[in-house]
Protein backbone atom coordinates (compact mmCIF):
# COMPACT_ATOMS: atom_id res chain seq x y z
CA UNK A 1 0.00 0.00 0.00
CA UNK A 2 1.30 3.41 -0.90
CA UNK A 3 0.38 6.80 0.56
CA UNK A 4 2.32 9.96 1.34
CA UNK A 5 2.72 8.57 4.86
CA UNK A 6 4.41 5.35 3.71
CA UNK A 7 6.73 7.45 1.54
CA UNK A 8 7.50 9.88 4.35
CA UNK A 9 8.32 7.15 6.84
CA UNK A 10 9.69 4.60 4.39
CA UNK A 11 7.29 1.89 5.60
CA UNK A 12 5.33 -0.72 3.65
CA UNK A 13 1.83 -0.24 5.09
CA UNK A 14 0.16 2.96 6.38
CA UNK A 15 -0.31 1.50 9.85
CA UNK A 16 1.14 3.13 12.96
CA UNK A 17 0.94 1.28 16.27
CA UNK A 18 -0.19 3.93 18.75
CA UNK A 19 1.71 4.73 21.89
CA UNK A 20 0.31 3.21 25.08
CA UNK A 21 2.10 4.11 28.29
CA UNK A 22 3.83 1.16 29.99
CA UNK A 23 2.79 -1.46 27.41
CA UNK A 24 4.22 -0.43 24.05
CA UNK A 25 7.80 -1.54 24.56
CA UNK A 26 10.72 -2.20 22.21
CA UNK A 27 9.58 -5.77 21.49
CA UNK A 28 6.12 -4.69 20.38
CA UNK A 29 7.37 -1.67 18.43
CA UNK A 30 10.01 -3.74 16.64
CA UNK A 31 7.45 -6.46 15.78
CA UNK A 32 5.15 -3.87 14.18
CA UNK A 33 7.99 -2.25 12.23
CA UNK A 34 9.29 -5.64 11.10
CA UNK A 35 5.76 -6.44 9.84
CA UNK A 36 5.80 -3.33 7.63
CA UNK A 37 4.04 -0.80 9.88
CA UNK A 38 5.54 1.76 12.24
CA UNK A 39 5.98 0.67 15.86
CA UNK A 40 5.96 3.29 18.61
CA UNK A 41 7.71 3.05 21.98
CA UNK A 42 5.48 4.58 24.66
CA UNK A 43 6.23 6.40 27.92
CA UNK A 44 7.67 4.11 30.62
CA UNK A 45 7.34 1.13 28.33
CA UNK A 46 9.23 -2.03 29.18
CA UNK A 47 9.35 -1.39 32.92
CA UNK A 48 7.25 -2.55 35.82
CA UNK A 49 7.87 0.03 38.52
CA UNK A 50 7.04 3.70 38.83
CA UNK A 51 9.98 6.07 39.21
CA UNK A 52 9.94 9.77 39.95
CA UNK A 53 13.59 10.07 38.91
CA UNK A 54 13.86 12.06 35.68
CA UNK A 55 17.32 10.68 34.89
CA UNK A 56 16.17 7.08 35.37
CA UNK A 57 13.18 7.69 33.13
CA UNK A 58 15.54 8.88 30.40
CA UNK A 59 17.85 5.89 30.83
CA UNK A 60 14.90 3.50 30.67
CA UNK A 61 13.93 5.05 27.36
CA UNK A 62 17.52 4.80 26.12
CA UNK A 63 17.51 1.08 26.90
CA UNK A 64 14.25 0.60 24.99
CA UNK A 65 15.48 2.53 21.94
CA UNK A 66 18.69 0.49 21.83
CA UNK A 67 16.74 -2.73 22.24
CA UNK A 68 14.37 -1.77 19.42
CA UNK A 69 17.35 -1.02 17.15
CA UNK A 70 18.79 -4.42 17.98
CA UNK A 71 15.51 -6.10 16.95
CA UNK A 72 14.84 -4.24 13.71
CA UNK A 73 16.63 -2.03 11.25
CA UNK A 74 13.30 -0.60 10.08
CA UNK A 75 12.07 2.83 11.20
CA UNK A 76 10.23 3.13 14.50
CA UNK A 77 8.88 5.98 16.62
CA UNK A 78 9.12 7.20 20.18
CA UNK A 79 6.16 8.96 21.81
CA UNK A 80 6.98 12.20 23.61
CA UNK A 81 4.17 13.49 25.80
CA UNK A 82 4.61 17.27 25.97
CA UNK A 83 2.73 17.68 29.24
CA UNK A 84 2.39 20.77 31.35
CA UNK A 85 5.26 23.12 32.24
CA UNK A 86 7.08 22.21 35.45
CA UNK A 87 7.60 18.76 36.88
CA UNK A 88 5.80 17.03 34.01
CA UNK A 89 7.84 18.85 31.38
CA UNK A 90 11.16 17.85 32.97
CA UNK A 91 10.39 14.24 32.03
CA UNK A 92 9.49 15.18 28.49
CA UNK A 93 12.62 17.32 28.11
CA UNK A 94 14.84 14.46 29.27
CA UNK A 95 13.12 11.95 26.98
CA UNK A 96 13.53 14.31 24.00
CA UNK A 97 17.26 14.63 24.81
CA UNK A 98 17.65 10.85 24.96
CA UNK A 99 15.63 10.29 21.79
CA UNK A 100 17.84 12.75 19.91
CA UNK A 101 21.06 11.30 21.36
CA UNK A 102 20.01 7.79 20.36
CA UNK A 103 18.77 8.82 16.92
CA UNK A 104 15.23 7.45 17.27
CA UNK A 105 14.06 8.20 13.70
CA UNK A 106 10.43 9.27 14.25
CA UNK A 107 8.76 11.29 17.03
CA UNK A 108 5.07 10.94 17.81
CA UNK A 109 4.42 14.06 19.88
CA UNK A 110 1.22 14.13 21.90
CA UNK A 111 -0.73 15.90 24.61
CA UNK A 112 0.62 19.38 24.17
CA UNK A 113 1.57 22.25 21.94
CA UNK A 114 3.58 21.59 18.74
CA UNK A 115 5.53 24.75 19.51
CA UNK A 116 7.44 23.11 22.36
CA UNK A 117 9.63 20.50 20.61
CA UNK A 118 9.14 20.76 16.82
CA UNK A 119 12.13 22.97 16.03
CA UNK A 120 14.53 20.91 18.16
CA UNK A 121 13.40 17.59 16.69
CA UNK A 122 13.53 18.98 13.15
CA UNK A 123 17.08 20.27 13.61
CA UNK A 124 18.03 16.75 14.65
CA UNK A 125 16.59 15.29 11.44
CA UNK A 126 13.76 13.47 13.19
CA UNK A 127 10.40 13.04 11.46
CA UNK A 128 7.64 14.55 13.58
CA UNK A 129 4.05 13.36 13.76
CA UNK A 130 1.84 15.45 16.03
CA UNK A 131 -1.22 13.95 17.72
CA UNK A 132 -4.21 16.33 17.67
CA UNK A 133 -7.84 16.18 18.69
CA UNK A 134 -9.19 19.25 16.87
CA UNK A 135 -8.75 20.91 13.47
CA UNK A 136 -7.37 24.01 15.21
CA UNK A 137 -4.59 21.96 16.75
CA UNK A 138 -3.89 20.27 13.40
CA UNK A 139 -3.52 23.66 11.66
CA UNK A 140 -1.25 24.89 14.43
CA UNK A 141 0.88 21.75 14.08
CA UNK A 142 1.23 22.25 10.34
CA UNK A 143 2.27 25.87 10.91
CA UNK A 144 4.82 24.71 13.50
CA UNK A 145 6.49 22.55 10.84
CA UNK A 146 5.64 18.95 11.73
CA UNK A 147 5.72 16.30 8.96
CA UNK A 148 2.33 14.65 9.49
CA UNK A 149 -0.64 14.94 11.80
CA UNK A 150 -2.54 12.24 13.64
CA UNK A 151 -6.10 13.23 14.47
CA UNK A 152 -7.57 11.00 17.11
CA UNK A 153 -11.28 10.77 17.86
CA UNK A 154 -13.05 10.24 21.15
CA UNK A 155 -13.71 6.58 20.33
CA UNK A 156 -10.09 5.84 21.11
CA UNK A 157 -8.62 4.42 24.28
CA UNK A 158 -6.71 6.75 26.57
CA UNK A 159 -7.17 10.49 26.83
CA UNK A 160 -9.09 12.27 24.13
CA UNK A 161 -9.79 15.90 23.38
CA UNK A 162 -12.27 17.93 25.36
CA UNK A 163 -14.44 18.53 22.35
CA UNK A 164 -15.29 14.82 22.07
CA UNK A 165 -14.99 14.82 18.28
CA UNK A 166 -15.56 11.50 16.62
CA UNK A 167 -13.07 10.09 14.14
CA UNK A 168 -15.75 10.10 11.42
CA UNK A 169 -16.23 13.87 11.76
CA UNK A 170 -12.71 14.93 12.71
CA UNK A 171 -10.70 13.20 9.95
CA UNK A 172 -12.31 14.80 6.86
CA UNK A 173 -12.36 18.24 8.50
CA UNK A 174 -8.66 17.96 9.26
CA UNK A 175 -7.97 16.68 5.72
CA UNK A 176 -9.74 19.74 4.31
CA UNK A 177 -7.88 22.14 6.60
CA UNK A 178 -4.25 21.10 6.13
CA UNK A 179 -1.92 20.02 3.33
CA UNK A 180 0.08 17.51 5.36
CA UNK A 181 -0.72 13.79 5.45
CA UNK A 182 -3.43 13.08 8.03
CA UNK A 183 -3.40 9.84 10.00
CA UNK A 184 -6.68 8.70 11.57
CA UNK A 185 -6.83 7.35 15.10
CA UNK A 186 -9.58 6.34 17.49
CA UNK A 187 -11.81 3.31 17.07
CA UNK A 188 -9.89 1.61 14.26
CA UNK A 189 -9.28 -2.08 14.85
CA UNK A 190 -9.75 -3.82 11.49
CA UNK A 191 -9.57 -3.39 7.71
CA UNK A 192 -13.06 -1.91 7.60
CA UNK A 193 -11.99 0.87 9.94
CA UNK A 194 -8.74 1.34 8.07
CA UNK A 195 -10.41 1.60 4.65
CA UNK A 196 -13.10 3.91 6.05
CA UNK A 197 -10.34 6.19 7.34
CA UNK A 198 -8.62 6.17 3.95
CA UNK A 199 -11.99 6.94 2.32
CA UNK A 200 -12.26 9.98 4.59
CA UNK A 201 -8.97 11.24 3.19
CA UNK A 202 -6.55 9.90 5.78
CA UNK A 203 -3.25 8.47 4.53
CA UNK A 204 -2.67 6.14 7.43
CA UNK A 205 -4.15 4.78 10.62
CA UNK A 206 -3.04 5.01 14.24
CA UNK A 207 -4.18 1.96 16.19
CA UNK A 208 -3.73 1.49 19.93
CA UNK A 209 -6.21 -0.89 21.56
CA UNK A 210 -6.02 -3.44 18.73
CA UNK A 211 -2.26 -3.77 19.27
CA UNK A 212 -2.86 -4.27 23.00
CA UNK A 213 -4.44 -7.60 22.11
CA UNK A 214 -1.39 -8.97 20.31
CA UNK A 215 1.02 -11.65 21.44
CA UNK A 216 3.98 -9.29 21.59
CA UNK A 217 2.22 -6.67 23.74
CA UNK A 218 3.40 -6.98 27.35
CA UNK A 219 -0.03 -6.03 28.76
CA UNK A 220 -1.19 -8.56 31.36
CA UNK A 221 -3.40 -11.41 30.11
CA UNK A 222 -6.25 -10.15 32.33
CA UNK A 223 -6.29 -6.95 30.31
CA UNK A 224 -6.30 -8.84 27.01
CA UNK A 225 -9.14 -11.01 28.38
CA UNK A 226 -11.15 -7.88 29.24
CA UNK A 227 -10.78 -6.76 25.62
CA UNK A 228 -11.89 -10.15 24.31
CA UNK A 229 -15.00 -9.96 26.52
CA UNK A 230 -15.84 -6.36 25.59
CA UNK A 231 -19.02 -5.45 23.72
CA UNK A 232 -20.18 -2.28 21.97
CA UNK A 233 -21.21 -0.69 25.28
CA UNK A 234 -18.25 -1.76 27.39
CA UNK A 235 -16.49 1.60 27.56
CA UNK A 236 -17.43 5.03 28.84
CA UNK A 237 -15.69 8.38 28.55
CA UNK A 238 -15.00 9.90 31.95
CA UNK A 239 -14.58 13.63 32.05
CA UNK A 240 -11.66 14.92 34.07
CA UNK A 241 -9.37 17.86 34.68
CA UNK A 242 -12.39 19.99 35.52
CA UNK A 243 -10.30 22.57 37.35
CA UNK A 244 -9.08 24.02 34.05
CA UNK A 245 -11.73 25.88 32.03
CA UNK A 246 -12.90 23.87 29.05
CA UNK A 247 -11.99 26.50 26.47
CA UNK A 248 -9.09 28.57 27.60
CA UNK A 249 -7.04 29.52 24.58
CA UNK A 250 -4.41 31.19 26.71
CA UNK A 251 -3.89 27.93 28.56
CA UNK A 252 -3.54 26.06 25.27
CA UNK A 253 -0.96 28.55 24.01
CA UNK A 254 1.04 28.18 27.20
CA UNK A 255 1.29 24.51 26.46
CA UNK A 256 -1.53 23.11 28.54
CA UNK A 257 -2.89 20.05 26.93
CA UNK A 258 -6.36 19.72 25.55
CA UNK A 259 -6.49 16.17 26.76
CA UNK A 260 -6.14 17.16 30.41
CA UNK A 261 -9.37 19.04 30.16
CA UNK A 262 -10.99 16.27 28.26
CA UNK A 263 -11.95 12.76 28.95
CA UNK A 264 -10.46 9.37 29.32
CA UNK A 265 -12.18 6.31 27.85
CA UNK A 266 -12.33 3.38 30.25
CA UNK A 267 -13.83 -0.08 30.36
CA UNK A 268 -16.98 0.20 32.49
CA UNK A 269 -15.99 -2.40 35.07
CA UNK A 270 -17.73 -3.12 38.38
CA UNK A 271 -14.90 -1.22 40.07
CA UNK A 272 -15.57 1.87 37.98
CA UNK A 273 -19.32 1.57 38.56
CA UNK A 274 -18.70 1.57 42.33
CA UNK A 275 -16.42 4.61 42.11
CA UNK A 276 -18.99 6.46 40.06
CA UNK A 277 -21.83 5.51 42.40
CA UNK A 278 -19.77 6.61 45.44
CA UNK A 279 -18.95 9.94 43.86
CA UNK A 280 -22.40 10.65 42.46
CA UNK A 281 -23.31 14.27 43.09
CA UNK A 282 -20.07 14.93 44.93
CA UNK A 283 -16.46 14.78 43.79
CA UNK A 284 -16.18 14.14 40.04
CA UNK A 285 -15.52 10.46 39.36
CA UNK A 286 -12.05 10.94 37.93
CA UNK A 287 -10.88 12.87 40.98
CA UNK A 288 -12.44 10.22 43.24
CA UNK A 289 -10.51 7.63 41.29
CA UNK A 290 -7.27 9.50 41.81
CA UNK A 291 -7.95 9.72 45.55
CA UNK A 292 -8.32 5.93 45.73
CA UNK A 293 -11.05 4.00 47.50
CA UNK A 294 -9.04 3.72 50.69
CA UNK A 295 -8.29 7.45 50.75
CA UNK A 296 -4.71 6.84 49.65
CA UNK A 297 -3.95 8.98 46.61
CA UNK A 298 -2.70 6.98 43.64
CA UNK A 299 -1.28 8.60 40.56
CA UNK A 300 -2.28 7.55 37.06
CA UNK A 301 1.03 5.70 36.78
CA UNK A 302 0.48 3.53 39.86
CA UNK A 303 -3.01 2.62 38.75
CA UNK A 304 -1.82 1.86 35.23
CA UNK A 305 0.97 -0.40 36.45
CA UNK A 306 -1.41 -2.21 38.80
CA UNK A 307 -3.89 -2.92 36.00
CA UNK A 308 -1.76 -3.31 32.88
CA UNK A 309 1.41 -4.83 34.32
CA UNK A 310 0.21 -6.68 37.42
CA UNK A 311 -3.20 -7.59 36.03
CA UNK A 312 -5.19 -6.20 38.98
CA UNK A 313 -8.08 -5.26 36.77
CA UNK A 314 -10.73 -5.62 39.49
CA UNK A 315 -9.36 -2.73 41.57
CA UNK A 316 -8.09 -0.44 38.84
CA UNK A 317 -9.17 1.08 35.57
CA UNK A 318 -8.44 -0.12 32.05
CA UNK A 319 -8.48 2.39 29.26
CA UNK A 320 -9.55 0.99 25.90
CA UNK A 321 -11.26 1.79 22.62
CA UNK A 322 -14.97 1.98 21.96
CA UNK A 323 -14.22 -0.53 19.20
CA UNK A 324 -12.92 -3.13 21.69
CA UNK A 325 -16.08 -5.16 21.02
CA UNK A 326 -14.63 -6.02 17.59
CA UNK A 327 -11.52 -7.63 19.06
CA UNK A 328 -11.91 -11.37 19.18
CA UNK A 329 -8.40 -12.83 19.18
CA UNK A 330 -4.80 -12.23 20.17
CA UNK A 331 -2.70 -12.58 16.99
CA UNK A 332 0.94 -11.71 16.45
CA UNK A 333 1.62 -8.25 15.05
CA UNK A 334 2.62 -9.79 11.73
CA UNK A 335 -0.66 -11.73 11.54
CA UNK A 336 -2.64 -8.63 12.43
CA UNK A 337 -1.00 -6.42 9.80
CA UNK A 338 -1.23 -9.16 7.17
CA UNK A 339 -4.94 -9.47 7.96
CA UNK A 340 -5.46 -5.72 7.66
CA UNK A 341 -3.88 -5.72 4.22
CA UNK A 342 -5.55 -8.94 3.03
CA UNK A 343 -9.03 -7.82 4.11
CA UNK A 344 -8.64 -4.45 2.38
CA UNK A 345 -9.06 -5.74 -1.20
CA UNK A 346 -12.53 -7.32 -0.79
CA UNK A 347 -13.70 -4.02 0.73
CA UNK A 348 -12.47 -2.10 -2.32
CA UNK A 349 -14.14 -4.64 -4.65
CA UNK A 350 -17.40 -4.41 -2.73
CA UNK A 351 -17.40 -0.62 -2.96
CA UNK A 352 -16.46 -0.69 -6.63
CA UNK A 353 -19.49 -2.86 -7.25
CA UNK A 354 -21.67 -0.17 -5.74
CA UNK A 355 -20.55 2.85 -7.73
C1 LIG B 1 -3.84 1.71 27.37
C2 LIG B 1 -3.62 2.96 26.60
C3 LIG B 1 -2.57 3.80 26.94
C4 LIG B 1 -2.34 4.97 26.22
N1 LIG B 1 -1.25 5.74 26.52
C5 LIG B 1 -0.96 6.82 25.74
C6 LIG B 1 0.23 7.56 25.97
O1 LIG B 1 1.04 7.25 26.84
N2 LIG B 1 0.49 8.63 25.18
C7 LIG B 1 -0.38 9.00 24.18
O2 LIG B 1 -0.12 9.97 23.48
N3 LIG B 1 -1.53 8.32 23.95
C8 LIG B 1 -1.81 7.22 24.69
N4 LIG B 1 -2.94 6.48 24.41
C9 LIG B 1 -3.78 6.83 23.25
C10 LIG B 1 -3.28 6.08 22.00
O3 LIG B 1 -1.99 6.51 21.66
C11 LIG B 1 -4.21 6.26 20.78
O4 LIG B 1 -4.49 7.62 20.59
C12 LIG B 1 -5.51 5.50 20.90
O5 LIG B 1 -5.27 4.24 21.46
C13 LIG B 1 -6.16 5.33 19.54
O6 LIG B 1 -7.44 4.79 19.66
P1 LIG B 1 -7.74 3.19 19.70
O7 LIG B 1 -7.42 2.75 21.07
O8 LIG B 1 -9.19 3.13 19.39
O9 LIG B 1 -6.90 2.54 18.66
C14 LIG B 1 -3.19 5.30 25.14
C15 LIG B 1 -4.25 4.46 24.81
C16 LIG B 1 -4.47 3.30 25.51
C17 LIG B 1 -5.60 2.40 25.09
Image (cartoon, helix red, strand yellow):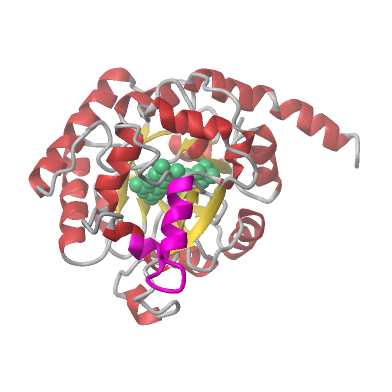
Q: Is residue 273 magenta?
A: yes
* Residue 303 image offset from top left, x and y in percent: 30, 46
Taking depth in this image into account, of 186 and 280 the one nearest to the observer is 280
* Residue 133 image offset from top left, x and y in percent: 49, 61
Q: The N terminus appears in which quarter of the rendering?
A: top right
Is residue 295 visible in the rendered image? The answer is: yes
* Residue 342 image offset from top left, x and y in percent: 67, 22
Horizontal arrangement in the rendering, residue 116 relative to residue 150 (left or right): left
The vertical placement of 48 against 283, above or below, is above
Q: Is residue 284 magenta?
A: yes
Outermost residue on the right side: it is 354
- Quadrant of the rendered image containing residue 264: bottom left
Q: How many marks?
A: 0
* Residue 275 image offset from top left, x and y in percent: 41, 57
Which residue is depicted at the point 40% across and 69% down? Answer: 284
Q: The C terminus appears in which quarter of the rendering?
A: top right
The vertical placement of 334 against 151, above or below, is above
- Quadrant of the rendered image containing residue 337: top right
Taking depth in this image into account, of 353 and 268 the one nearest to the observer is 268
The vertical placement of 325 against 88, above or below, is above
The vertical placement of 61 against 342, above or below, is below
Horizontal arrangement in the rendering, residue 290 relative to residue 190 (left or right): left
Which residue is depicted at the point 42% across and 29% down? Answer: 222
Is residue 152 visible in the rendered image? The answer is: no
Horizontal arrangement in the rendering, residue 111 relative to residue 263 (left or right): left
State whether the magenta stretch is mostly helix, strand or loop. helix
| Range shown magenta | 270-288
Taking depth in this image into account, of 58 and 201 the one nearest to the observer is 58
Which residue is depicted at the point 61% across and 58% down? Answer: 166
Amino acid sequence: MKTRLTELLNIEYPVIQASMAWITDAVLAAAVSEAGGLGTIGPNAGFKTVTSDVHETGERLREQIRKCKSLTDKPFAVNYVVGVPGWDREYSDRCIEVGIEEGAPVAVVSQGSPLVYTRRLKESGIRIIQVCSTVRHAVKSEEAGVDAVIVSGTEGGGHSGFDQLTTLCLVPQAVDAIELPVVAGGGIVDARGMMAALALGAEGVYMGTRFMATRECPAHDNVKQALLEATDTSTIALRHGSSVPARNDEAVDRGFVEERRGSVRLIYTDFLKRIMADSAGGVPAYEALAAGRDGEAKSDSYRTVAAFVEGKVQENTITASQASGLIRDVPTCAELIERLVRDASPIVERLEGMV
